[in-house]
Amino acid sequence: QQQVKQSPQSLIVQKGGISIINCAYENTAFDYFPWYQQFPGKGPALLIAIRPDVSEKKEGRFTISFNKSAKQFSLHIMDSQPGDSATYFCAARKAGGTSYGKLTFGQGTILTVHP
Amino acid sequence: GAGVSQSPSNKVTEKGKDVELRCDPISGHTALYWYRQSLGQGLEFLIYFQGNSAPDKSGLPSDRFSAERTGGSVSTLTIQRTQQEDSAVYLCASSLASRQRGYTFGSGTRLTVV
């Protein structure tokens, strides 16, 4: 059962444009929603994260928008740069339980930013 | 160390052989996770260790897969009688046992079964 669905699978954006990646989840027990960025040959690195008690979080050019009622969240990259070209993963974590640290990941989005 | 260290970085093995993948987490991190990343796929959870608690093995795909964590630090993922479908990048991550922290991933071990 895929609990976190991510779209699109790939995205091409021109330099300076806005990149938008969307995720939808099914389990209302999720309480923490991070985004990870992965460059080729490297492990994913935490980019930004949000909790469901806020609707938006911004860090520099990266913003997470969260819609609890729709069970959706998205990553917006403003003024996209070629150096942002990477694979992006959304994830979600359940509150409580013996494995509360375990993250469920989306399928990933390959972002290409053209100069 | 400063980061999560995984070894080897690449491993090519023949079908049917056993392999061991090693993970050295960040010192002081009590939680350790193994994930598998197949080509073009997301990250598939395999197993999770948290302190002295029993590990969450719910993601292990078959009984050919096992993992242990010795002394609350180094972890080894063992795949017995490897199959071609086991070819993937195996990622290890660690974290503090805090709800405010994210994972720190290693660079992974790329396993190729021929």
Image: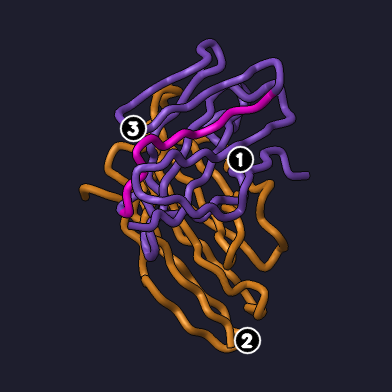
Chain colours: A purple, B orange
Residue mark closest to the camera, 3 vs 1: 3
* In the image: residue B66, left or right of residue B103: right
Does residue B55 sit above or below A9 in this rendering? above
| Depicted B15 relative to depicted B19: above or below | below
Horizontal side of residue A64 vs A41, given as left or right: right
Report helix, strand or loop for mark 1: strand
- Residue A88 visible from this viewpoint: yes
Q: Which residue is mark 2?
A: B15
Pinpoint the chain carrying mark 1: A
Residue contact between numbered discs 3 and 1, judged by CB atoms under 8 Å: no
Badge 2: chain ID? B
Residue carrying label 1: A104
Q: Residue at image x 39%, y 39%?
A: A46
CA separation in Å, label 3 and label 1: 25 Å
Give the spatial CA distance, label 3 vs label 2.
46 Å
Residue A73 magenta-highlighted: yes
Q: Earlier in the sequence, mark 3 or mark 1?
A: 3
Pinpoint residue A43: horizontal percent, then vertical percent. Answer: 40, 55
> Dot 3: what SS?
loop
* Residue to which mark 3 is pinned: A61
Q: In the image, what residue type sits under mark 3?
A: Arg
* Magenta-colored span: A71-82
Q: To which quarter of the image does residue B106 belong? A: bottom left
Residue A94 included in the magenta stretch of the image? no
Q: Is disc 2 on the same chain as disc 3?
A: no
Please name which of the two marks, 2 or 1, marks the residue nearer to the observer. 1
